[in-house]
Image: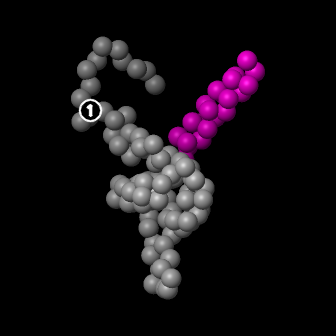
Amino acid sequence: MKIKKNKIVSFIDCPVAEALTVIGGKWSLLIIFHLGDEKRRFGELKRLIPSISEKMLIQELKKLTQLGVLKRKAFKEIPPKVEYSLTKEGQKIIPIIDQLEKFGKDLLDKKASR
């Protein structure tokens, strides 16, 4: 990818800005990463990401569902059961996360060798 310097890009037409509306939140990528190919319930996600508050997890799941990244399936049973999984659109984000993971591992390796 070539980054054009000195070019004014409208955020309305900027594909990077558009992508960041979906994955730019502090918790979005972690939630997507932990879902991967799995179906997970709220409690499982909370255990996998212990530093996120329940309120923030609820907000992020709602936002990602509204954006079409996650699918929410509610079962009619008592106690209520809800599962979250990635949509086809959400699965497109996995290769991006894989690249970020590789980049992060490289950074950690460099840090450890200093």
Colour setting? one colour
Residue at disc 1, secondary structure: loop
Q: Residues within 10 Å of mark 1 (few under 14, many from 20)?
A: few
Q: Is residue 91 magenta?
A: no
In percent of the image, x 47 and y 47: which residue is there? 27
- Determine if the magenta segment contains residue 113: yes
The image quarter containing residue 61 is bottom left
The quadrant holding residue 7 is: top left
In front of the other: 12 or 42: 42
Residue at image mark 1:
11
- Counting from the top left corner in percent of width and height, residue 94 is at 54, 47
The residue type indicated by label 1 comes to Phe
- Residue 93: image location, x then y, percent: 49, 46
Q: What count of labels does the image hold?
A: 1
Where residue 47 appears, x then y in whole percent? 60, 59
**Residue 61 shows up from this direction:** no
Residue occupying the far right of the picture = 113
- Please give the name of the residue rendered at 50% of the width and 77% of the height, measured from the top-left corner: 81
Where is residue 45, by image quadrant? Answer: bottom right
Tell me which residue sits at (58%, 53%) in the image: 50
Q: Which of these two is toward me, 101 or 96?
A: 101
Position of the C terminus, as image quadrant, is top right
User: Is most of the magenta stretch helix, strand or loop?
Assistant: helix
On the rendered structure, is 44 left or right of 13? Answer: right
Q: Is residue 102 visible?
A: yes
Q: Nearer the viewer, residue 51 or 61?
A: 51
Task: Tell me which residue sits at (26%, 32%) in the image.
Answer: 11
Q: Where 12 sits versus 31, above or below? A: above
Coordinates of residue 56 in the picture (x, y in percent): 42, 54
Q: Where are the magenta residues, as a range? A: 92-114
Please state if 67 lies on the left or on the right of 83 as rendered. Answer: left
